Image (cartoon, grey):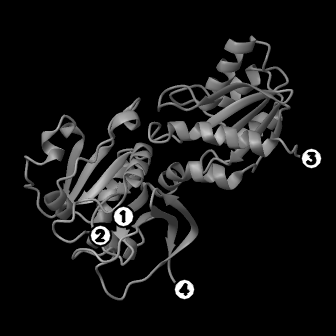
Amino acid sequence: MNIPDTDEPFMRLAIDLGFRGLGMTSPNPAVGAIVVRDGVVIGEGWHHKAGGPHAEVHAIRDAHEKHGPESTRGATIYVTLEPCSTHGRTPPCTSAIQEAGISRIVVGSTDPNPDHVGGGFALLRSAGIEVVTGIAEKEADHLLRFFRKHITTGRPWVIGKTAATLSGHTTLPQGEGQWISSPTSREDVQRIRRQCDAILIGGETFRIDNPSLTLRGKWAEGRDQPRRIVLSSDSQLVQTHHLFADEFRDRTTVHAGVTLLESLTKLGSEGVTSVLLESGGRLLAHALEAGLIDELVLYLAPIIGGGGSKTIPVQDFAARLDDVDVTMSGPDIRIIGYPAPLN
């Protein structure tokens, strides 16, 4: 099959739209879609929230509102994920695509749900619609990674986040201030928080840092605050700390007397598809050793030395990062990778 050179750029536009919904659609996936006719985008959409219209429906409605109900006949729709073919909280998107008269669909990722995989493609092909798959698949899979992990394992995707000096310290000497990372990096953390359903810390981080773990400014617009989870052996935590005293205290839950794996399993059973682990070095090291970190985000500040805490405060442990992305974040170096054994 000849695939036009324009398919990948159009799919990347749909992927960018899909990221707008990340953090707001759980337990559903974040999905983006655009409708194209004669090489021009005539409609666009993304999945806004669970229970609401899916991306394909938003894109088709957008095209109809801007260009009339006949505008989608013979058009191509680009969707980051295989359209749903079953009736859940909303009608199947395969029906909406057929009713709109769309003649061609281009898809990034195949549905990872073993109960649904390939079903949407089969229905569309049987209706005479041309189906093209695997376009910008790596990028589409990245958008889908939270949902894929949750639907296949029952547990959320876990992002470990930390900031350190160039010598691996996660605190500064006494009297040198609280922040290792730059304002630019802290703003980037807000972006990541917005994409995640929950933020998890350990009891030590709760007691020492007294964090708020909130979305602020533009990052808080249009979505609930993420759930805030404290994993601790002590169920009697200080109630005057921010997590129990601020206006979002109803978003705070203590997981006491359970392992990290048990905590993540419980969150998965409650529909949480993504967790940001913002805890100290000991819990991060344990999570890495146990293979519970799916993605690591490390901000390296241009500082030598530091306080008494280190990124990995344990001996005889090492892992490498695969598919590493290195960018500047203000004066800091931001490293994103996916942990894997050395051998």
Q: Amino acid at mark 1?
A: Thr
Q: Amino acid at mark 3?
A: Asn
* Any part of residue 177 in sight: yes
Q: CA distance from mark 4 to mark 3?
A: 40 Å
Q: Is residue 175 above or below residue 219?
A: below
* Any part of residue 82 in sight: no
Q: CA distance from mark 4 to mark 2?
A: 27 Å
Q: Which residue is mark 4?
A: 343
Q: Which mark is residue 2?
A: 3
Q: Residue at x 22, y 45 (%)?
A: 252
Q: Earlier in the sequence, mark 4 or mark 2?
A: 2
**Callout in the foreground (4, 2):** 2
**Callout in the foreground (2, 1):** 2
* Depth order, front residue of 217/3: 217
Query: Could you tell me residue 80's position as x and y percent?
Result: 66, 42
Q: Which residue is mark 1?
A: 162
Q: Earlier in the sequence, mark 1 or mark 3?
A: 3
**CB within 8 Å, label 2 to label 1:** yes
Q: Earlier in the sequence, mark 2 or mark 1?
A: 1
Q: Which mark is residue 342?
A: none
